Image (cartoon, rainbow, N blue to C red):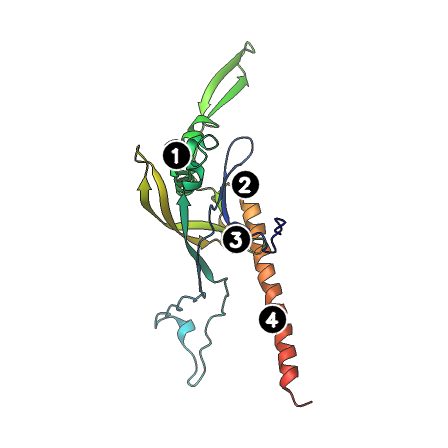
């Protein structure tokens, strides 16, 4: 007799979180995957230092004694460039079976989910929300010989900026990313030609902690959180590597003729 208990563990869902800057607090754009992708492609490209420039022949530093070895410049290591590629499936079939609970899906299908993903590509300075809030500041100054109060409106210049985006794939992988590719394949539509089934293929590049620290132009308050997430994920990777070393040591001891 079935008691409703299942031994299968509950599978966590991946997500993408973007923090949109506002004058008060950052507003997160949380996109939880409806279905986890069937596969996740990861690519790590090791850092390759640029070739040293050849000094001109007239440069005294270029001269050296015959037979003397010319030492290369010191190697400065950097984290490898890491990228992710995945395909998300969006389907409104389940929502359309209960139209009273999902009125948005009845009208627009999965267009709202696609729009949420598309906003990851747009800078906040050009968005409608960014134009409505924080674009006009009221400045009040007291001056003049009569001590009068003059009030004026000063329009602040908002520089377009892509907000910090976090790719969350379980507790062991939370990294800041920038989207590098975005493709939508609409497969089915409703009577208003809103898509009810679609595939979205996303390419992402991980932003390293060093790149975040070197970014002096960005004023995003989410940089601190992004740097913490990158360092936290890298620390877990190093801990797993140490665990593998322990397993390897046990395997080596097992094959030694002791």
Where residue 250 sits in the image (x, y, percent)?
Answer: 65, 78
Numbered disc 4: secondary structure: helix
Which numbered circle lies on residue 149? none
Inspect this view and state whether residue 130 appears. Answer: no
Nearer-N-terminus badge (4/1) = 1
Which numbered circle lies on residue 221? 2
Relative to 104, say whether 172 is above or below: below
Contact flag, marks 4 and 2 (Cβ < 8 Å): no
Q: Residue at x 48, y 32 (%)?
A: 101
Contact flag, marks 4 and 3 (Cβ < 8 Å): no
* Category of crowding for the residue at label 1, using alpha-carbon neighbours closer than 10 angstroms: few (below 14), some (14–19), many (at least 20): some
Numbered disc 2: secondary structure: loop
The nearer-to-camera label among 4 and 1 is 4
* Category of crowding for the residue at label 4, using alpha-carbon neighbours closer than 10 angstroms: few (below 14), some (14–19), many (at least 20): few
Give the Cα distance between marks 2 and 3: 23 Å
Q: Residue at x 61, y 48 (%)?
A: 4
Nearer-N-terminus badge (2/1) = 1
Give the Cα distance between marks 2 and 1: 18 Å
Inspect this view and state whether residue 208 appears. Answer: yes
Kindly identify which residue carries mark 3: 169
* Category of crowding for the residue at label 2, using alpha-carbon neighbours closer than 10 angstroms: few (below 14), some (14–19), many (at least 20): some
Numbered disc 3: secondary structure: loop
Compare residues 143 and 199 and report the one nearer the observer: 199
Nearer-N-terminus badge (4/2) = 2
Relative to 123, say whether 143 is above or below: above
Kindly identify which residue carries mark 4: 244
Contact flag, marks 4 and 1 (Cβ < 8 Å): no
Compare residues 46 and 105 and report the one nearer the observer: 105
Give the Cα distance between marks 4 and 1: 48 Å
The nearer-to-camera label among 2 and 3 is 3
Contact flag, marks 1 and 3 (Cβ < 8 Å): no
Where residue 194 sits in the image (x, y, percent)?
Answer: 33, 36
């Amino acid at each position: 007799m079935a008691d409703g208990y299942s031994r299968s563990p509950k599978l966590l869902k991946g997500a993408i979180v973007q923090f949109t800057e506002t004058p008060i607090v950052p507003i997160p754009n949380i996109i939880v995957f409806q279905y986890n992708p069937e596969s996740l492609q990861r690519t790590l490209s090791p850092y390759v230092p640029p070739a040293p420039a050849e000094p001109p022949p007239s440069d005294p530093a270029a001269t050296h004694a015959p037979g003397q070895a010319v030492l290369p410049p010191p190697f400065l290591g950097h984290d490898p460039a890491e990228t992710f590629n995945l395909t998300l499936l969006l389907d409104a079939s389940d929502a359309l079976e209960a139209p009273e609970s999902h009125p948005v899906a009845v009208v627009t299908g999965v267009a709202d989910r696609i729009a949420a993903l598309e906003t990851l590509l747009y800078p906040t300075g050009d968005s409608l929300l960014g134009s409505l809030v924080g674009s006009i500041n009221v400045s009040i100054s007291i001056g003049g010989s009569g001590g009068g109060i003059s009030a004026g409106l000063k329009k602040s210049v908002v520089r377009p900026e892509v907000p910090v985006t976090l790719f969350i794939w379980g507790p062991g992988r939370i990294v800041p990313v920038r989207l590098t590719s975005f493709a939508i394949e609409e497969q089915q539509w409703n009577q208003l030609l809103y898509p009810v089934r679609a595939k979205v293929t996303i390419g992402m590049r991980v932003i390293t902690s060093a790149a975040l620290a070197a970014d002096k132009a960005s004023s995003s308050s989410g940089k601190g959180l992004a740097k913490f997430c990158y360092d936290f994920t890298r620390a877990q990777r190093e801990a797993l590597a140490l665990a593998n070393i322990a397993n390897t040591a046990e395997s080596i001891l097992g094959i030694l003729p002791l």
